[in-house]
């Protein structure tokens, strides 16, 4: 990548972030006339304006559609250019090369441990850097190029993404061991009618949250009340004292099944947690392709995986 091209991209990105010439120039530590010239040169090369100038103040701008498309790809170009340099330096210095993967905190621990156990003969210095965020944030970071691969639960659909289903499991209900429902091998939504429910905050995964309440409404099931938490551990004391039941995914259920709390699968076929391996549709990285192939091969070798269940005592 030519240095002048880098300067033009950096100028467009800074102006897109600040939407003000003076602030963008200050951010880049260049003069405002220099920033103006860089934007003019870039728009001349592209043959199209990227920014709409404010009539009342020429220093303020907004991005047009062409500008948004350019800035998105410019961010990726700069990021990949930086990573290419880092990878080359890593090889020359004989150190590990990081590969950035994101996962949802709701991901089955088995999937995470399987991914981390993979070694690629063609890339012996590859080191997986794992980050944990909620699915919507993971997808944003993937599209922005911050992450190269994502394990996400029910990610939003997009033509810019390639999604591969890798796991599917029920929701689980945490309850006190002395709860009358604990004698059942599984529970239904009807069993939970007029009980106090503990649910994760809607902002953590709106589609999953809505699917639970929509199913309940369709089945004419209503909670006596709903309490929200951001982590399964927050629900534990309320479940343990038998004042509430908590809706959990498998990862959270594994944490809750202890000290007077037991878990039962929720037997509602339409309420399933689906986990996907997600990459950018335009990502032709050989490293990513090899990692995905190795990951899927390793999962398929564990033939009992789809029969894995929680250690539930009745």
Image: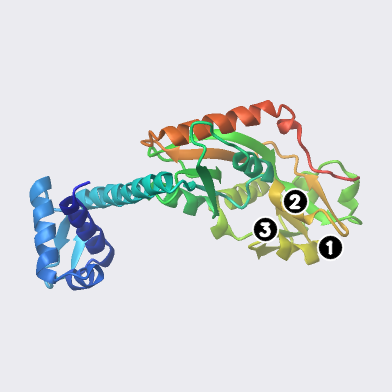
Q: Which mark is residue 253?
A: 2
Q: Which residue is drawn at 89% across and 45% down?
A: 313
Residue 289 picture location, percent across and down: 46, 32
Name which residue lies at 52% across and 33% down. Answer: 292
Which residue is outermost to the front? 93
Q: Quick one: label 2 or label 1, which is nearer the N terminus?
A: 1
Q: Distance between the residues labelled 2 and 1?
A: 13 Å
Label 1 Cα crowd, 10 Å radius (few <14 / some 14-19 / many 20+): many
How far is mark 3 from mark 2, CA to CA?
13 Å
Find residue 113 and report its horizontal and vertical position in percent. Answer: 65, 43
Residue at which label 1 appears? 240
- Regarding residue 177, the answer to whether it shows in the image is yes
Residue 201 in the image: x percent, y percent? 60, 61
The foreground one among 281 and 236 is 281
Q: Tell me the quarter of the picture where residue 154 sits.
A: top right
Q: Which of marks 3 and 2 is nearer the N terminus?
A: 3
Q: Residues within 10 Å of mark 3 (few under 14, many from 20)?
A: many
Q: Is residue 71 left or right of residue 312?
A: left
Measure the alpha-carbon separation of dots 1 and 3.
Answer: 16 Å
**Which tag is nearer the camera, tag 1 or tag 3?**
1
Q: In screen coordinates, is 15 left or right of 288?
A: left
Numbered label attached to residue 26: none
Q: Is mark 3 on a helix, strand or loop?
A: strand
Residue that label 3 marks: 199
Quarter of the image with the C terminus is top right
């Amino acid at each position: 990548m030519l240095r002048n091209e880098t300067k033009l991209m950096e100028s467009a990105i800074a102006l897109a972030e600040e939407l003000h010439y003076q602030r963008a120039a200050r951010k880049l530590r260049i003069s405002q006339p220099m920033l103006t010239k860089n934007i003019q040169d870039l728009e001349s090369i592209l043959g199209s304006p990227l920014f709409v100038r404010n009539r009342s103040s020429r220093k303020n701008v907004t991005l047009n559609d062409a500008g948004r498309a350019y800035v998105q790809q410019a961010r990726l170009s700069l990021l990949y250019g930086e990573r290419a340099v880092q990878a080359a330096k890593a090889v020359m210095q004989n150190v590990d090369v990081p590969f950035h993967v994101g996962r949802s905190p709701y991901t089955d621990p088995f999937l995470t441990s399987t991914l981390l156990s993979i070694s690629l003969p063609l890339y012996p210095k590859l080191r997986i850097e794992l980050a944990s965020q909620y699915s919507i944030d993971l997808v944003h970071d993937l599209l922005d190029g911050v992450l190269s691969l994502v394990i996400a639960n029910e990610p939003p659909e997009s033509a810019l993404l390639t999604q591969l289903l890798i796991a599917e499991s029920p929701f689980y209900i945490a309850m006190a061991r002395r709860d009358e429902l604990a004698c059942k091998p599984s529970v239904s939504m009807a069993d939970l009618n007029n009980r106090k429910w503990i649910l994760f905050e809607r902002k953590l995964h709106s589609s999953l949250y809505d699917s639970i309440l929509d199913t309940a409404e369709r089945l004419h099931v209503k909670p006596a009340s709903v309490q929200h938490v951001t982590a399964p551990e927050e629900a534990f004391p309320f479940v343990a004292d038998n004042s509430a039941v908590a809706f959990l995914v498998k990862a959270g259920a594994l944490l809750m099944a202890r000290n007077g709390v037991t878990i039962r699968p929720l037997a509602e076929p339409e309420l399933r947690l689906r986990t996907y391996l997600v990459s950018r549709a335009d990502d032709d990285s050989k490293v990513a392709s090899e990692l995905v192939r190795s990951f899927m091969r390793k999962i398929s070798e564990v033939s009992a995986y789809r029969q894995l269940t929680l250690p539930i005592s009745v």
